[in-house]
Each structure stands twice: as structure tokens, then as C-alpha cells.
Image (cartoon, rainbow, N blue to C red):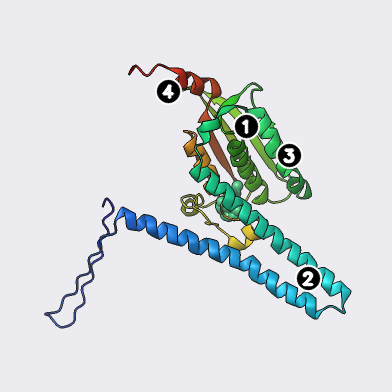
Amino acid sequence: GEALAVSARVAPLGSRLVLLLVEDLTEARRIEAVRRDFVANVSHELKTPVGALSLLSEAVMDASDDPEAVQRFAGRMQIEATRLTNLVQELIDLSRVQNDDPLEDAEPVRVDELVAEAMDRCRHAAGTKQITMASGGPADLSMWGNRGQLAAALGNLVENAVNYSPARTRVGIAARRVTAPGGDHIEIAVTDQGIGISDKDKERIFERFYRVDPARSRATGGTGLGLAIVKHVAASHGGEVTVWSSEGQGSTFTLRLPEAGAARDRAQQPSGLD
Ligand code: ADP
């Protein structure tokens, strides 16, 4: 395999005994390990809310003669049930973006509509924290792709911007067209004035279930799958997602995707083979 990991250890048991351990970690084994980790992570993430629900239901039964306590426990059961629903929905979304070819039902998707949708989705959360959302850019931009997937990707970025920002800050969404020899692109940049991300964490936040601060992520209903979904959507559309961030100052996530006209022209170009 490509990845050859050699770990050698020399055990000085007398002068004669040398223990050499050589391990060839093939690509297939690496993939298998990633799959196993994923299943273990999913199981763990499911177990937490299910365990809480089970304990809370017992608490409700024990407190049947105390209506106030029953109310309180029922409220917490609702929070855990919502968490479970979010997780299952994000797992379904992730499996969709990993398995479906998004370009099978690709269409021109208007950027201003996607941006408005993403902002609507976050309006409530932003409102309770008095976060101002603003968007800018030309009105006539369109991307080429699967509408639902592109909406989910941008929605996740705006949701994160709101979730990982303190009260009374600003979230900006700026769209522009970038001219490139291989075909024009659309760039949508989501900028926040939030907690930021360290260089070390920047490399890992796009991994499934990776969170810088698991407690904070859970408190805001996060699943740790959002950015993995964004990354997959971008890649399968022939684009990419990049991050710029400064700890304590804020972050900018930029989604770059093929422009609708350019992508269509490219698809219609004669291949020269027939
Ligand atoms: P989550 O559901 O936890 O938000 P994501 O996959 O969307 O999962 O993000 C992974 C982690 O990346 C988050 O838990 C958080 O630590 C970090 N992160 C994502 N977006 C931002 C942001 N705008 N500012 C600071 N940290 C962020």
C-alpha cells in the first residue's frame, strides 16, 4: 500500500535480544479503521441522549406526585429528544451527500435565494443573541448544483457562525463571482466575530464528529457532522470550502462552487471523441 507505517522498537533485553516490530498499514486497513471509528462514534452519540431519556423517564415516574418536578423532567426529555432527532437527521443528510450523485439533478441555483434561506433558518437563534446578519453581493449570481445540498451546506455555515459567536456581534454573508480560466466560480464567504479556531483545530474541524469544545457544541444542538457535510457537498460539486480564522477574533468560511453558466457550457462542450 501507499501508506507504509513502520514502527520499530528496540528492546534492550540483554545484548542479544532485539525486538523489531514492523507494521504495514495498508490503505484498505486505514479505511476500515475510519469506518470502525465512525460506527463507534455514532453509537456513542446515540447512547448519550438515549441514556438521558431513560433516566429522565424513571425520574418522571418517581416524581408522579410532584407536578412541578414532572414538568421539569419532561422539559429536559424534550431537549434530549430534539438532540436525538437532529443527530439522526444529520446522519441521513451525511449519508445522502456521500452516496447520491448531486449532479444527477443539477440545476441553476440562485445565490440570493440560498442566502435568504440560510439567514431565515438562523433568524431565531441570531435574534435571541442579538446577532446582526447582513448579506451583500450582485443580485444575479447562480451556481450549478443540487439545490437541497447547496442549501444545507450554506445553512450549516451560517448556523455555525451564529452558534460560535458571542451576543451583539455581526455575521456577514458576501457573494461574488470569480473569473477563472477553467470556468467562473461563485464564492460565498460567511464571516463571524466569534471565538475563532486555532491552527491545530482548523485541520480537523471538517472530520465527522470532531468538535473543538464538545460541551459547547452539544449545548447549541450541534452534532459535529455539519462541516463534514459542507465539505462533501463542496467536493462533489467540483468546488471546495476553506477557512480563515483568528482565535478570539472570528472566522470566515468560504464556499467556492462552479458558476451556473460556466458549468453548463462546460457540460455542453463537444468532447472531441465522437
Ligand atoms: P457542530 O455540530 O459541533 O457545530 P460542525 O461540524 O459544524 O459541528 O463543526 C465542527 C466544530 O468546528 C464545532 O464543534 C466548532 O468547534 C468548530 N466550528 C465550526 N464553525 C465554527 C465557527 N464559525 N467559529 C468557531 N468554531 C467553529
Mark 4 and mark 3 in contact (Cβ < 8 Å)? no
Q: Which mark is residue 174?
A: 1
Residue 79 horizontal/vertical position (percent): 73, 62
Which residue matches tag 3? Answer: 120
Res 22 quadrant in image: bottom left
Q: Is residue 46 visible?
A: yes
Of badges 2 and 3, the one in the foreground is: 2
Q: Is residue 196 visible?
A: no
Of badges 3 and 1, the one in the foreground is: 3
- The residue located at (55%, 57%) in the rendering is 211
The kind of secondary structure element at disc 4 is: loop
Nearer-N-terminus badge (2/3) = 2
Which residue matches tag 4? Answer: 182
**Is 273 left, or right, of 234 in this rendering?**
left
Q: CA distance from mark 2 to mark 3?
A: 31 Å
Residue type at the position of mark 2: Phe
Q: CA distance from mark 4 to mark 2?
A: 58 Å
Q: Is residue 47 above or below residue 148?
A: below
Asked whether 249 or 166 is in front, the reply is 166
Label 1 neighbourhood size at 10 Å, few (<14), some (14-19), many (20+)? some
Which residue matches tag 2? Answer: 73
